[in-house]
Image (cartoon, rainbow, N blue to C red):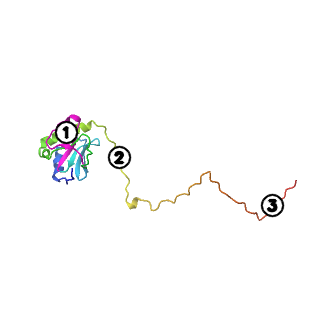
Amino acid sequence: MAWVKIPAENHDVLRAALPKDPRVETLKMFGGLAALVNGNMFGGLFGKSFIVKLGEADYAEAMQLDGAEPFDPMGNGRVMSNTVFMPEAVLDEPAELRDWLRRAFDHARTLPAKQKKKPKPATKPENKPAKKPAKKPAKKSPSVKKVTTKRASKKPARRTSR
């Protein structure tokens, strides 16, 4: 699939068709809009159409639609499992669009919830330390012995009596 800029008006069309459920979240993604429930994406915009992630029976039914195809975002043969790139004409049918998004929502609700990732710390220069502390010199391994030489003492050695 060649990349096509998502028309701005499609954002409002998708938002209006999403299930009216407080668990539905929307997220801007790659110039489009993605719909999630429990951290799992169930639908979104792509090109001039939209995608839905469906259960097996609904996936088979969706693939029967004229113009539907497995979703291969990069166009390199690596399709997203159970995800259908829907025909553009469905966007013009609000009831049908709502139905497909509801089916995708119902399927995604059955998936295990994804844990939210911890936000990465800011990488702005003002948040970085000025200088890293100097490294300590590496300890020598125990097998390496330090060779020392004895220096002659300035004082004469003491004599001991026998």
Q: Residue 81: which quarter of the image?
A: top left
Q: Nearer the viewer, mark 1 or mark 3?
A: 3
Q: CA distance from mark 2 to mark 3?
A: 73 Å
Q: Earlier in the sequence, mark 2 or mark 1?
A: 1
Residue at 19% over, 41% down: 101
Residue 58 magenta-drawn?
yes
Q: Amino acid at mark 3?
A: Ala
Residue 35, image x, y percentages: 23, 45
Which image quadrant is residue 100 in? top left
In the structure shown, which secondary structural element does the residue marked by tag 1 occupy? helix
Q: Position of residue 6 (x, y in %)?
A: 19, 53
- Total of numbered circles in the picture? 3
Q: In this figure, which residue is indicated by the disc labeled 3?
A: 157
Reading the image, the residue beneath label 2 is: 117
Which of marks 3 and 2 precedes in the sequence? 2
Q: Is 115 colored magenta in this rendering?
A: no
Q: Which residues are magenta?
A: 48-73
Looking at the image, which residue sits at the far top?
A: 57
Q: CA distance from mark 1 to mark 3?
A: 99 Å
Whether tag 1 and tag 3 are in contact, CB under 8 A, the answer is no
Q: Earlier in the sequence, mark 1 or mark 3?
A: 1
Disc 3, SS: loop
Q: Residue furthest front?
A: 77
x then y, percent, for residue 132: 47, 60
State the residue position of label 1.
102
Label 2 is placed on what type of residue?
Answer: Lys
